[in-house]
Image (cartoon, coloured by chain):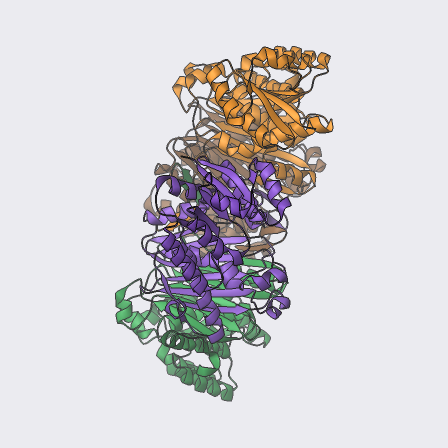
Chain colours: A orange, B brown, C purple, D green
Amino acid sequence: MTVRFAVLGAGRIGQVHAKAIASVPGATLIAVTDAVEAAAQAVAEKHGCDLRTMETIAGAADVDAVVICTPTDTHADLIERFTGAGKAVFCEKPIDLDLARVKTCLEVVRGNGGKLMVGFQRRFDPDFLALKAAIDAGAIGEVEMVTLTSRDPGAPPIAYIERSGGIFRDMTIHDFDVARWLLDEEPTHVFAAASNLVDPAIGAAGDWDTANIILTTASGKQATINNTRRATYGYDQRIEVHGSGGSASADNHRINRVEIATADGYTRAPLQDFFMSRYAVAYAAEIAAFVAALADGTEMPTTGKDGLRALALADAAVRSVAEGRAVAVSEVL
Amino acid sequence: MTVRFAVLGAGRIGQVHAKAIASVPGATLIAVTDAVEAAAQAVAEKHGCDLRTMETIAGAADVDAVVICTPTDTHADLIERFTGAGKAVFCEKPIDLDLARVKTCLEVVRGNGGKLMVGFQRRFDPDFLALKAAIDAGAIGEVEMVTLTSRDPGAPPIAYIERSGGIFRDMTIHDFDVARWLLDEEPTHVFAAASNLVDPAIGAAGDWDTANIILTTASGKQATINNTRRATYGYDQRIEVHGSGGSASADNHRINRVEIATADGYTRAPLQDFFMSRYAVAYAAEIAAFVAALADGTEMPTTGKDGLRALALADAAVRSVAEGRAVAVSEVL
Amino acid sequence: MTVRFAVLGAGRIGQVHAKAIASVPGATLIAVTDAVEAAAQAVAEKHGCDLRTMETIAGAADVDAVVICTPTDTHADLIERFTGAGKAVFCEKPIDLDLARVKTCLEVVRGNGGKLMVGFQRRFDPDFLALKAAIDAGAIGEVEMVTLTSRDPGAPPIAYIERSGGIFRDMTIHDFDVARWLLDEEPTHVFAAASNLVDPAIGAAGDWDTANIILTTASGKQATINNTRRATYGYDQRIEVHGSGGSASADNHRINRVEIATADGYTRAPLQDFFMSRYAVAYAAEIAAFVAALADGTEMPTTGKDGLRALALADAAVRSVAEGRAVAVSEVL
Amino acid sequence: MTVRFAVLGAGRIGQVHAKAIASVPGATLIAVTDAVEAAAQAVAEKHGCDLRTMETIAGAADVDAVVICTPTDTHADLIERFTGAGKAVFCEKPIDLDLARVKTCLEVVRGNGGKLMVGFQRRFDPDFLALKAAIDAGAIGEVEMVTLTSRDPGAPPIAYIERSGGIFRDMTIHDFDVARWLLDEEPTHVFAAASNLVDPAIGAAGDWDTANIILTTASGKQATINNTRRATYGYDQRIEVHGSGGSASADNHRINRVEIATADGYTRAPLQDFFMSRYAVAYAAEIAAFVAALADGTEMPTTGKDGLRALALADAAVRSVAEGRAVAVSEVL
C-alpha cells in the first residue's frame, strides 16, 4: 500500500514535510496547495506533484492523507474538514491555542471516526528514541526525575511572538510533550517561574523569554524544564532522566566534531542553531511513523490527546506564573 | 603571623579540619577536645597537639581560633561562648536548625565584635572557583539562570535523617549557598516540589528524598536545584550558569580517567561517591581562606549572614512544599 | 549548466554514487550499466534513468561524465576509454593496483586532455573539511605531526583480501591520501611495521591485519597511521594534527548521543560500524565537488596524481615491511 | 616495621620524595644530604630530619633505605656504594646514560644482594594503574597495540638538553618503560623517526625535538610513541591500548573541569603543564610501593632490569634514526 499525500501549506515546514514524503518508502506526494500560489508552485515543481485547491484536495479520490502546515488559527477547522472528508490527517502542533477549541475539534474528529496525528517531532529524533528505548529496557530502573534543557539560539521576531500564544504554548509545548512521554505518567501539577531577561520588547508584547517549570505526578515523579529564548552557543536541546538504577542523557548536536587545543584551552564547535537542521531526521521519521501507522492500521504514535494534554500544561503554566503557585492540570482541562 | 587553632569535636569532620590546619602554612594546631576522649586522643597523637577541655581552650592564651565540629545543636552556644572569649570562630554549617536561634546568635557575635566564618566548603572547590572567576571576568555576560544538580550517592541512616532538620536544611542548604553565590543577588522567592521515591522510611521520618527547587530574584534571575538522596553512579555535583553571552559549567569528579571501548560501547568510571574525598581539596582551601582572612584582617569569606540566608531559603522551601506555592523569603526571615 | 551522468557499475558503491548524483543540484543521472543486468535495472528503476551498454554510453551525446564503479582491474582501461571519448571521469580508488599501469593510464589521460577525479571521499567529510579549514586558517600554527587512527570494525572476507592488493593498497591508501592532504608536503620516506594478530587466514593469504606506519617529509614533518582490521567498538576514524601553535582533532561518529550512568560507570554508544554510513555525507559531497569543478572549469579536487602518490606510498610500505627499513618514495615511483 | 629513609640530593625531585616519605605510613625521614648545604638544610627544617653527610648516612645504623636524587652521573656509583652498605636503594631514572655502565652497576648490586628500585613513576599513576588493571582483568582481550602520546609543554634549557643524553634517553625513556609494561612482552625491534621542528638550538646541540617511534615484539604486538618538546596546550600524556576485544584509554589532566560555551564554541581548560604536579600522586604512590615491597619482602615493583631495558630501547632508537632502519634490541644490549 502506498499512502497518497497532499500537503496543505507550502511554507517552511510544508516544504520540510513535502521532502519527507518524497523520501519515505510507501508514501507519494500527489498535490500541494497554498494561499500563496507561487509557494505551492515551487513545491509542485520540485517534487513533480499537482498544484490544487483546498477544495479539490478535500474531494480528491487519489488523496489518502493530508499534512496540515497552514497558519495555526486554521488548524482546527482543517482537521475537522479533512477528517470529515475521510482523509487521514497529520497536523503540525498546535491544534489550536485555545483549549476549548481543541476539545471541540477532537470531538468532531472522534465523530468522524478520523485518524489524526499531531506533530511532536522530537519523539522521533533518533537520539531521543534511543534514550527512551534504553529506559523502557530498564537501563535506569524506575524513572524518578526528568530534566529538560531547551534553549533557543535566539528570539523570534516580535510579530511572531505576538501571535504565538506565549512561550509556554509556543516553545515549552514541545518540552511538555517530551516530559509526558518520558515520565510515562500524566503530570498533575505545574509550577512555572518566568522572567524577561533577553529582550524587553518580548515583555512589552506580554510574553516571557526565560522560564523554569516543575511538573509533578501523582506518584511523586518530577520533571523540570529550563527555557530561554537566547543561547549564544546554539540550539541547546538536552534530556536527562534520573531513575532508581541510574541516569540516562542525550547530548546536543554540534556543527562539527573538531576540537582545537591551544594555550587558551580546548575548543569544540558550537551547536547547530536552527531547529529544522537539528531535527531534520526527526521530521522525516515522524512522517514515516505516520505512514507506518496508516499502513498497519495501528494507533497514531502521537495523538490529538497528546496535543490537548501538552496545551493544558501550557495553560496551567501561564496561570502558575500569574498566581505564584502550583496549578493543578484539572483546573484548566 | 601564625594562627593557633583548637578543634572542638574530633569526629569525621573534625579530623578533616585538623588535617587541613596541619597542612596550611600560617596555621598550627594547638589543641583538640571531644566529649569522647579517645577520639580527641587520636587526633592529638596524630598531629602532636594537646588534648584539652572546652574550658581550658576557651581560656587559653595560646589559642587564637577555634573550629567547631561538634553536633549541630551545640553550634550556636559554642559560637557565642568562643567569640565571647575573643577567639575567631570557624563553624561547620549550620549555625542552628532554628532561624530565630541563628539570629540571636549572630546578634551576640556582633555584640562580641567576634569574627565568624561559616563552613560552606563548596565555594572553595577549585573547579567552582574557576567557574565563578570566569563568570566574574565576563565570560558569559550577565548571569540569568543557575542550574545546580546535587545528588547524594545514597541516603544517610534514618537516625541521621531524623536529626537533620530535613533534606532542605541538611542537604539543599549547600546548594542554596552556591545559588546565592553564583546569582550574586538575593533570591526573593522559593518554590519547592518534594517526593518520597528513594526510601519510604525517609517519608515515615517526615522527610523527603527527591526535590526540585526554583529560586527567583527581584531582577528576574532564576536558579534551579535538583536533589535526590540516591545516585547509583556516585556523588553528582554539577553546576551550570547561563548568561546573556553564553553558558559556563563545572563537571563531576570521576574515580579515574580510564575509558573502555567494546562492542557494548564506551564506558568511563563512575563518580567519586564520598563527599569528603570529593571535596577534600575544598575543605583544606576553606581553612586556608579562614587563616588568610585572619592574617590580613579582611572580611570572612563566608559569614554568619550566609548561614542565616541559606537557612531562610531552606525554611521557605519547607513551607513551599506544604502550601504548594512560591514563598517569599521575607515571610520566614 | 547541468552535468549529465552515467554510472558504470551498479554494485554497492555504484548505488551510492547514483543516489548522490540524484541529490546534487546541477547533476542528472542519464544512464547506468552493469555486467549484471538486474543490478543495473534496479538502479535505472529507482532513479528513472536509462539502462544502457558501455558501448552506447561511450558514444552518447547526452552524457557528459561517467562514474566508474566497476571492479578495480577494469578502472584503468575505462578511464582511458572514456576520457578518450571526451567524457569527464570520476573513478573510485584505486586507478590500478600496479603503479606502472597507473602511470601509463595517467599519460593516456593527459594525451586525451581528459578530466579525471579519483575518489578519496574522506577529503569531503564535513568534520575533516572543518579540521583542514581550521589548520589552513592558522589555528594550530605550522603543521608538525599528523596522527591517523584508522581501524576497520572487522576484516573483509578472505576472497576480498586476496584480490585487494594487501592492507596498504586497500585500506591504508585512504590514510596515505589524508596524510598527504594534511601534511601539505609530499612524504619522502615510509616505514611500516605489520603483523598478523586478527586472523591467521589473512596471513595465510599473504596479507597483514595490523600495522603502524611512519611517513616523513623533507622538512621533517611526520605522520603516523595506526591500522587494524578489527575494532570491536566500531569503525574508528580519528585524525589529530599537531602544530607549532596547538593541536586539532576530529572525533568519531557514534551510533547515538545517549549516555547511561549506573554503578558500573558511564556508557556511551559504540561507533557506526559501516564505512558507507560513516562516510555517507562525504560520498555525496565528493560528487558535488566533481560537479562543481566541471561547472566552474576548475581543477579536479582530487586528481590522478593523488591516486598515483597514495599508491606509491602503499608500495613503499610493502617494501618497508619486507626490508625492515625506511623506504624512499623515489625508490618505487 | 617502619622504613627509615635518607634522601640523597635535596633539589626539586629530592624535595618531592622527602615530602612523599613524610606522608607515607610506615616510612620516616631520618636524614638528608646535598652538596649544596642550604638546600639540604631547607629540607631538614621542613621535615624535622637530620642534615648529614653521604659518609655518615652510608654508615648509619638508623637508616634502612636511601632515595638517590643526585645528578645522573652519580647514580651508578651511589647505587653501588649504598647497596654495598646494606641499604635498600630507590634511584631516580636513569641508572646511567651509558648502557655498559648500567650493566656493571647491576652486577655489583647483584653481588651485594642489594635491593634496588628504579623510579618510573608513571607506573604508579592512579589512572594508568586503573588502565592496567582493566587490561589485566581482560577488559579488552589480548593486547595488540599500545599508542602513547607524550608531549612536553615546552623544551628544557639547552644546557639541560646537552647533558640529557638526548630526547630518547631523557624523555622517551619513560614511554619505553610504559610501553614495556603495557605490552607485557619485550620489544625486539625499534624504529624511530626524529626531526627538529621546535627549536633549531636543540638541533645545534645534537638532539631532536620531535619523534615517532614504533616498537615491535616477537609475537607481533606493536607500540607507538609520539613525542614533541612543545605542546602549547599543556603536558599531554595519553595512553591507548588496543586489544582483540576492545580498546582502553587514559585521558589527560586538565587545570580544571570548567567549560565555557559561547558563540565561538565550547572551551575547556588547557592541561596541567608541569610534570611534578601532573604526576604528584604518582610520585607519592611510587615511594609507598617501595616501602610496601621492603615491608613485605616482595620483589621491587620496578627494577634495575627495567632501567636497563628502557635505556636499551633508547639506544636502539638513536641508532635507528642514524641508520633509517628497524634496530634489533639485541644489537645494543
Between residues C38 and C168, which one lies in front from this camera angle?
Answer: C38
Q: Can the viewer see residue D94?
A: no
Q: Residue at x 73, y 27 (%)?
A: A298
On the picture, is B40 further left or further right than D16?
right
Residue B185 falls in image quadrant = top left
Q: Which residue is drawn at 71% across and 36% down?
A: B200
Residue A243 falls in image quadrant = top right
Between residues C197 and B286, which one lies in front from this camera angle?
Answer: C197
On the picture, is B28 further left or further right than A302?
left
D16 is higher (above) or lower (below) than C12: below
Provide residue B191's location: percent of width, then percent of height. 55, 25
Q: Which residue is drawn at 46% across and 74% down?
A: D190
Provide residue B270's location: percent of width, then percent of height. 58, 50
B185 is higher (above) or lower (below) than D307: above
Q: Can the viewer see residue C77?
A: yes
Between residues B24 and D164, which one lies in front from this camera angle?
Answer: D164
Residue projecting furthest to the bottom: D111
Provide residue D152's location: percent of width, then percent of height. 38, 61
